Amino acid sequence: MDFELSPEQKMLAQTVASFAKQRSPVERFRKLREQQQPWDPQVWAHMGELGWLSVPFSEDAGGFGAGMVEVAIIVEGLGRALAPEPYLASVVLAGMTLAAAGSQDQHERWLTPMMEGETALSLAYAERATRYDHGEPGTVAARDGSGWRISGEKVFALGGAQAQHFVVSAQTPDGLGLFVLDAEGPGVDRRVVRTIDGQGAAQLVLDGATVGDEHRLGEPGPSARSVLGHAIDRGAAAACSEGLGVAQTMLDMTVAHLKEREQFGVPIGAFQVLQHRAVDMFVEVQLLRSMSVLATVQSEHDDPQVRQRAISAAKATLASSGRFVSHEAIQLHGGIGITDEHDIGLYFKRMLSLNAVLGDEQHHVERFAAGAGF
Amino acid sequence: MRAPRGELRVGLGHKDPGIRAQGRSSINIFPDDRSVDNARLSGRMPGMDLSFSAEDETFRREVRTFLSEALPDGLRAKAEIDAPFAMEDVMQWHRILFSRKWAAPGWPAEFGGPGLSPTQRFILTEELELAGTPQLSPFGLVMVGPAIMQFGTPQQQQRFLPKILSGEEVWCQGYSEPGAGSDLASLQCKAEDDGDSFIVNGQKTWTTYAQYADWIFCLVRTNGKVKKQAGITFLLIDMKSPGVEARPMLTIGEQPAFCDTFFDNVRVPKENVVGKIDAGWTVAKALLGHERTLLAMVGLSQRLLRRIKRIAAETTVGGKSMLEHGAWRGKIARLEIELEALKMTNYRVLAGAQLGHAPGPESSILKLRGTEINQRMYELAMEIMGHDALSWYAADGVVPAAEQGIAPQFCYARANTIFGGSNEIQKNIIAKWILGLPSGK
């Protein structure tokens, strides 16, 4: 058993922390939010230059061949700074689906420019009627000559507000299929959704969107379905890591506030009732860290049952611990915590988002309870 | 330009000629920063490892084989239904573990311990808890034993440690007093200097199983003129000394677990002082540290969870088992997830210990959360039992034998969050020493 980061991993963590501190203070996100710009393409391109966007992809696909530990390190650091660039959405969700299901030609066409930071990808799997289930989409892909004709509606595609390409799941005569659609392609109507966390997502209305067969990723059927499920699980694991960064930052900000803010002639952190509430937050952050480690390590487990059990336990923990920490953080900040001017509310809302996507608490508790390990 | 294949650039410098050559204005968004190294890494980074080594798995099998062979039938029968163990059961099991060198998993080889690694100690404890074997009294093995190793003289080590290990001498703890609970340092039980001896007068309370003990380790006041922590001495007292009296009292679980222990002019030789006179607070603090890691109760709670699932699976409501009712299943699942988080935290502590690191902040939550989860496991068990939860030591056949012990254990488990430094005291400690908050009001 070993949870130590290697020297290289520690360096990567330091690099991400330096990036966050020096080049991506929360102020940067605030400005983007004011301009209703989901993220800064120049920063995205820089992440590509640094190699961050290639991290989890195999060397055959032109990637770095690292794993989910490195992804977790990056995403946690970005979470701490509320950096809105779509790492989770583009690299983990859409990118890893494309990497697993796509051919070498498809990698070169869509994955390579993303790894270079020139484009961003978005995974459009969620639908209103199927909630968090990915297995039976209502969107339909029908044969259209040598290509495909896709119709349906996708909601809350993360990173979709500014992505160039979407990986879309659709029902084919042979089962679930995965297709790459251009955001500006025929029959694709992208509607930008402004989200609670200021980052934005996309609703996709597909009305006979037509693509050639070279846009189909692998064979439709059980394997496409399991590739998609695995990518969503990895995304949930990454959401735990990002949520950990968010929760840890809220704890740090709250403790700092308790030390600085004076009432009744003393720092309010001297009051035991507030101390104990801060300790309760600390406990939840530690538990979340433990479960984030579990989800990260098990997200590549060969046995999907083991993987799903760990990830559902972790995502449910993110929901309960994240909710607790973010609610307490606002309360302990007092009135200033309710203002838009203070950063704590931005973290609070990011946590809400992370808990609402990729399976909420109820979804994951149910999956955990239905699993073979229960 | 992407970093070359198989190479990840860490560092944020942007003086890469490749980037310049392409003339990307994007890089200008970052102010120049010379403080960050632009190191290059190559090769695949190793992943974290959640598995136990082959040696450790072999060790686990060894423990299981031992348990299947060495647990006597009488104890096994009780373990199977989680019936309470009598003191003689506990001591019988102590002697069996001692003969296998496993009575004290944490003791180093030089004092007769098994010399196990932190991971093996964890595995041994976990397997013993999962099998429902009697829990050995911790006062000698986990508390005063290690204190004597750390602070005792060679004579004390030779005199006391072998008999603690063998179970020949049973110990209890004399810390709390009627007027000194969470504010332990205000204790008043007095030891007056009388040449080669101290004369001890006063009362200790919550002295668990003192009625069975041969020895008690006490914190006594040897100096009333200094700061309260500075006048305390750690003293070993023979329970057979004239003037010592232990009076058992019933707990809310109706077991005689606690005692009031009285000292009336008890003569104790000064050679029984551990550490220096007036320096007992240091010994006591070290000893509380030993206790805290003991209290995560992961194995115990895991076993309890299995009982809960078994009861829920065997209880039919409206034509299907409670385990098939979504609401009950969800309740159990949520608690199991919380236990999973505690277990992973325990693994983090363990992995650190295995590497020889000092315990990190994560270790401080084990007692807090471990005791709470154990209590909530009992609460859920009681809830799932419904009417059966009312049964009280009843051998009348109404309630299944395996469930009769749950109500008394539920009651006694309320002590979890009080003993070993109440959870509120634990929070004070975390607030001050980890979060760095000012002294409390």
Image (tube, coloured by chain):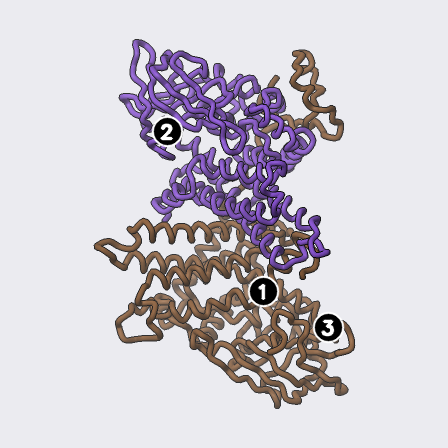
Q: Chain of mark 3?
A: B
Q: Residues within 10 Å of mark 3 (few under 14, many from 20)?
A: some
Give the structural element (helix, strand or loop) at label 1: helix
Give the number of the disc on residue A127: 2
Residue annotated with mark 3: B228
Using the rendered image of the protein, determine whether residue B397 is visible from the camera's viewpoint: yes
What is the quadrant of residue A5 in the picture? top right
Give the structural element (helix, strand or loop) at label 2: loop
CA–CA distance between discs 3 and 1? Answer: 23 Å
Q: Nearer the viewer, residue A33 or B125?
A: A33
Q: Position of residue A303 (x, y in %)?
A: 40, 38
Q: Are marks 3 and 2 on the same chain?
A: no
Chain A color in figure: purple
CA–CA distance between discs 3 and 2? Answer: 66 Å
Give the structural element (helix, strand or loop) at label 3: helix
- In the picture, which quadrant includes the C terminus of chain B? bottom right
Residue annotated with mark 1: B291
CA–CA distance between discs 2 and 1? Answer: 52 Å
Chain B color in figure: brown
Q: Is residue A20 above or below residue B241?
A: above
Q: Position of residue A42 (x, y in %)?
A: 61, 20
